[in-house]
Amino acid sequence: MSGKNFQGLKEQAEGAAKDAANTLGQTTQDAVNQITDASQKAIDKVSKAAQDGVEKATGQAAEAMSGFGKKCGFKK
């Protein structure tokens, strides 16, 4: 095999290796993005549930205090 042919084959192999590495890198980035998105959605859902729970508890506490105030004659 001549040196010129070998050089051409070497360049083709290097190009194919770079293409494969780029494809792997993009695939990895896509997977990371999907995991990040899913994690953010889960955090948002948990935060919303916690906020709803706090609001419900606050409302119940306000109602309880209102009832207590009425029993004690503080409110009419």
Image (cartoon, rainbow, N blue to C red):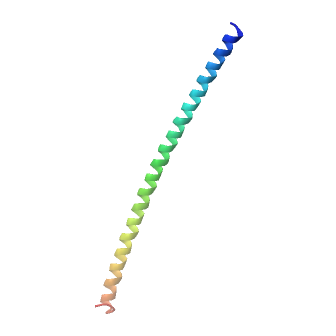
Q: Residue at x 35, y 74 (%)?
A: 59
Q: Which residue shows up at 36% across the image and 79% down it?
A: 62
Question: In percent of the image, x 30 and y 89: which residue is there?
Answer: 71
Q: How many marks on residues?
A: 0
Q: Residue furthest bottom?
A: 73
Q: Position of 41 compared to 72: left or right? A: right
Query: Horizontal and vertical percent for residue 4?
Result: 69, 11
Q: Quadrant of the C terminus?
A: bottom left
Q: From this viewpoint, which residue is outermost toward the right?
A: 3
8 up-or-down from 72: above or below: above
Relative to 35, residue 3 above or below: above
In the image, 8: left or right of 33?
A: right
The residue at the point 34 percent across, 88 percent down is 69
Q: In the orientation shown, which residue stands out farthest toward the top?
A: 1
State the residue in front, 5 or 74.
5
Q: Position of residue 3 (x, y in %)?
A: 71, 11
Q: Quadrant of residue 46?
A: bottom left
Q: Residue furthest left?
A: 76
- Residue 1 picture quarter: top right
Q: Position of residue 35 (x, y in %)?
A: 48, 45
Residue 13 coordinates in the image, percent (x, y): 62, 20
Above or below, comparing residue 29 to residue 4 in the picture: below
42 horizontally vs 76: left or right: right
The answer to which of 1 and 39 lies nearer the viewer is: 1
The answer to whether residue 42 is left or right of residue 62 is right
